[in-house]
Amino acid sequence: METVILFAFNRPNQILQAILSVNKNFSNHRPYIKVYLDEAKKNSPHFTNNLTTKENLIKSKDLGLINDLIIRDEPYGCAENVSQALSTEFKSHERLFCLEDDLELIYFNKNLPEAFFNFYENKDDISNITCFSPYIKNPLYRTYLSKRSSSLAWGTWKKYWKDFDIEYLRKLKPSKTFFKEISSNLGTDMPSSFIAFQKRKVDSWAIPWCVYNFLSAQKTVYPYKSFVKVNGHKVGATHTLGKKFKMTMADNNLTLNDFVTEINEDNNKFLNNYSIYERGKRKLFSLFV
């Protein structure tokens, strides 16, 4: 049985949609579903929605929609909530699939995470899977690899997570060569994102995880279309309100014959979504929401 970890905070309705989508569209076999709910500060504008989310999740567990629920007794923040949860879960699991409360798996996703896990299990240079993809113009293949990892509907193995240390990367002294390399391989937005992470201007586990995988010479496998619906731009978002990724939703299933093992030309099209220019456009459009 696969284990799916969901992370929740202040989206009471969207977390229910995420849970239902996992039950319906993750696999032919129902996975073990565990939710980690972070606490909101009492003076936070998110406090009321956080309470409602808590009530909805308790009801979901009582109804058998989820198997386990961890409610933080204090505000952890995104990075600590996710990193501590996965470090704890990997004590008893070899691989995990993760989903945040603003995501929904679609019908054609069914069995894809397991297929990715099984196919890439023994590929020593592929540490992450994901069911998400931003828009790829005229894709040449039905999957592609990238040195940039994803934090949307993603999964990894214990063997890759166990040595990941956020604070080590926060203290790393980057050189000009380092910034040039991550700009070229991870997107031109990554140098400024990494600096913001190091200066604690952004609460992120995904930025250091992305850099860690790059430094470890690891890659992530992506589908050519998105098998997950992203609602992060909708009401309830803490950092991404109005910032909507352009994507093409999947309209059929992938097969093992679609899985690639080498980086192909579609990676460059993928990285175009993570340029400073594209990030700036998403931020500009969000101002008119």
Image (tube, rainbow, N blue to C red):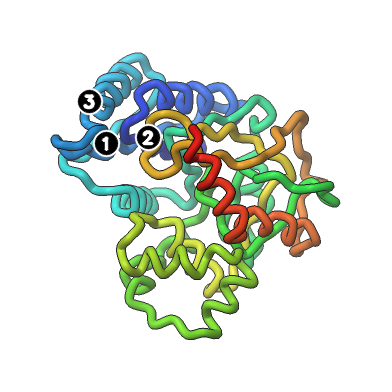
Task: Say if 117 sits above or below 41 in the image.
Answer: below
**What residue is shown with label 3?**
48
Tell me the distance, in whole angstroms, between the alpha carbons under discs 1 and 3.
19 Å
- Element on which disc 2 rests: strand
Q: Are marks 1 and 2 in contact (CB under 8 Å)?
A: yes
Question: Residue 265: where, in percent of width, then height?
Answer: 80, 61
**What residue is shown with label 2?**
34
Question: Residue 100: where, in percent of width, then height?
Answer: 44, 38
From the viewer's perspective, tell me whether residue 271 is left or right of residue 22.
Answer: right
**What residue is shown with label 1?**
70
For badge 2, the amino acid type reads: Lys
In which quadrant of the rendered view does residue 44 lie? top left
In which quadrant of the rendered view does residue 277 lie? bottom right
- Element on which disc 3 rests: helix
* Number of the label disc, if any, that sits on residue 120: none
Q: Residue at x 27, y 39 (%)?
A: 38
**Which tag, 1 or 2, sits closer to the chain's start?**
2
- Kindly report which numbered mark, 1 or 3, lies closer to the viewer in this rendering: 3
Question: Residue 192: where, in percent of width, then height?
Answer: 47, 67
In which quadrant of the rendered view does residue 83 lie? bottom left
- Element on which disc 1 rests: strand
**Which tag, 1 or 3, sits closer to the chain's start?**
3
